[in-house]
Image: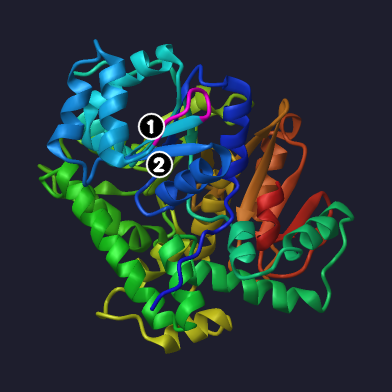
């Protein structure tokens, strides 16, 4: 029988900050894709930080509970009924009411305005945005919400789950001192490849800790992928979103400078695609990197919404999608990936995991591509970070190959706009002129 684990998540500290600073003046909405652990961490927070809590799971709530939020004239009656139905005593300013899967009860979301104004209790909502967007038509979205985003476990959270509480702090010290890892690099990269294979979905991590069997972990990931596929069908019954979702690994593997929708959808399917792409982005299942036409501070001012790349929000799911040509991804593939001996060029996998790490640390994703002087091929900067009044360009490599022609060309072209420049790769920390050669696990500290 699987052990129940509560994983340490960084979002907990942000929730504490909300409780301390807002003191019930806003509700907290924890946004995120399904299965990233929202419900688990919110209930843990409610249990630890309040005298009592009342959790309404709207995926299982009765019609009576749902109907309570249709009329907010008598809050005393609503609170009495909820306490009786859930056998919980609520204490003024010392209790929290949790609306789990709030997208299933739009009127409860709308009621937040009145409940927060009443100020008797705190309120936390959770929901997957892929459904919230669909179910909020016709209701008044409350302005009395503090919204925070929750993603799959980042690499540090993954290491915590495996019992390593010091590894990431040591990595950070090496980076701050600009020192090579030396013999420790081999272990650091093997640990990181394990994260790439398992990913940061709590169910997958839990399965690994229970069984130490990557094929069983893969089965869990396939269930999550199937869930996402079905979710995309719900928001787009034409199937276009689902087709685009499952095609992401194959499209990235072509190393093209943009996602070519025409390689996935036919001419008629490509019409009126804007809403589909917007829903995919809001789902937080997919991360979009947009082309910055004139890369400069304020990257959003130069965004090209018609030129983009798509990444899977969790690289563990990405791996399973990439090798889903069989019903079960065999352990031998995982072993070869883990030992870095699979012959396939896995640059696109490393690009996906870097995108995941940058998103988790609060960055939006931008890239820049342009033709060479001779026009026979293109240069490309995989990711651009805005820091202060300057840019940090990143080029990602899947091997120890440390050439960085695109970085050099970019920094020549935009010399006044760049401070730090990075080649993110699989070998040890080093410098090459003005370029920092960065082991990929250190990306989290940029």
Tell me where residue 297 appears, x and y as whole percent. Answer: 64, 26
Residue drawn where x is 25% and y is 14% of the image: 72
Q: Residue 211: within the magenta?
A: no
State yes or no: discs 1 and 2 in contact (Cβ < 8 Å): yes
Q: Secondary structure at mark 1?
A: strand
Is most of the magenta stretch helix, strand or loop? Answer: loop
Please say if 299 is above or below 60: above
Please say if 6 is above or below 189: above
Please say if 42 is above or below 177: above
Asked whether the viewer can see residue 366, the reply is yes
Side of 396 where 44 appears, left or right: left
Tell me where residue 150 appears, x and y as whole percent. Answer: 48, 43
Residue 59: which disc? none
Part of the protein shown in magenta: 89-94
Side of 383 where 168 appears, left or right: right
Residue 308: which disc? 2
Q: Secondary structure at mark 2?
A: strand
Residue drawn where x is 19% and y is 16% of the image: 71
Side of 353 where 228 appears, left or right: left
Q: Residues within 10 Å of mark 2 (few under 14, many from 20)?
A: many
Residue 305: which disc? 1
Snapshot colouring: rainbow
Tell me where residue 185 appears, x and y as whole percent. Answer: 75, 74
Q: Residue 91: within the magenta?
A: yes
Residue closest to the eye, 209 or 120: 120
Residue closest to the eye, 246 or 140: 140
């Amino acid at each position: 029988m699987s052990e129940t684990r509560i994983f340490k998540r960084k979002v907990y500290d942000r929730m504490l900050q909300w409780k301390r600073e807002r003191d019930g003046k806003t509700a907290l909405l924890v946004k995120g894709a399904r299965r990233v652990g929202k419900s688990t961490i919110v209930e843990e927070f409610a249990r630890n930080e309040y005298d009592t809590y009342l959790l309404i799971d709207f995926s299982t709530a009765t019609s009576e509970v749902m109907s309570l939020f249709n009329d907010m004239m008598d809050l005393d009656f609503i609170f009495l009924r909820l306490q009786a139905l859930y056998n919980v005593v609520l204490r003024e300013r010392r209790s929290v009411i949790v609306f789990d899967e709030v997208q299933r009860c739009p009127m409860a979301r709308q009621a937040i305005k009145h409940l927060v104004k009443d100020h008797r209790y705190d309120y936390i909502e959770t929901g997957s945005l892929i459904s919230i967007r669909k179910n909020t038509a016709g209701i008044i979205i409350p302005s009395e919400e503090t919204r925070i985003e929750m993603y799959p476990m980042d690499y540090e959270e993954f290491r915590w789950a495996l019992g390593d509480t010091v590894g990431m702090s040591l990595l950070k010290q090496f980076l701050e001192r600009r020192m090579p890892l030396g013999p420790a690099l081999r272990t650091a990269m093997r640990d990181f490849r394990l994260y790439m294979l398992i990913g940061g979905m709590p169910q997958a991590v839990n399965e690994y800790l229970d069984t130490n069997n990557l094929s069983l972990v893969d089965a869990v990931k396939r269930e999550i992928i199937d869930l996402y596929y079905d979710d995309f069908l719900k928001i787009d019954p034409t199937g276009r979103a689902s087709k685009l979702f499952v095609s992401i690994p194959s499209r990235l593997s072509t190393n093209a400078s943009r996602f070519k929708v025409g390689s996935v959808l036919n001419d008629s399917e490509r019409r009126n695609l804007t809403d589909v792409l917007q829903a995919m982005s809001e789902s937080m299942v997919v991360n979009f990197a947009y082309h910055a036409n004139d890369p400069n501070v304020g990257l959003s001012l130069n965004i090209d919404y018609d030129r983009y790349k798509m990444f899977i929000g969790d690289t563990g799911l990405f791996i399973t999608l990439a090798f889903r040509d069989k019903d079960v991804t065999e352990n031998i593939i995982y072993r070869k990936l883990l030992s870095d001996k699979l012959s396939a060029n896995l640059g696109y996998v490393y690009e996906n995991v870097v995108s995941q790490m940058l998103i988790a640390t609060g960055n939006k994703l931008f890239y820049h591509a342009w033709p060479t002087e001779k026009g026979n091929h293109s240069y490309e900067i995989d990711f651009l970070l805005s820091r202060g009044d300057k840019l940090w360009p990143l080029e990602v490599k899947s091997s120890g190959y440390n050439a960085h022609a695109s970085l050099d060309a970019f920094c020549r072209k935009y010399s006044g706009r760049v401070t730090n420049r990075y080649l993110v790769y699989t070998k040890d920390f080093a410098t090459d002129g003005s370029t920092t050669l960065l082991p990929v696990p250190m990306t989290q500290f940029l």
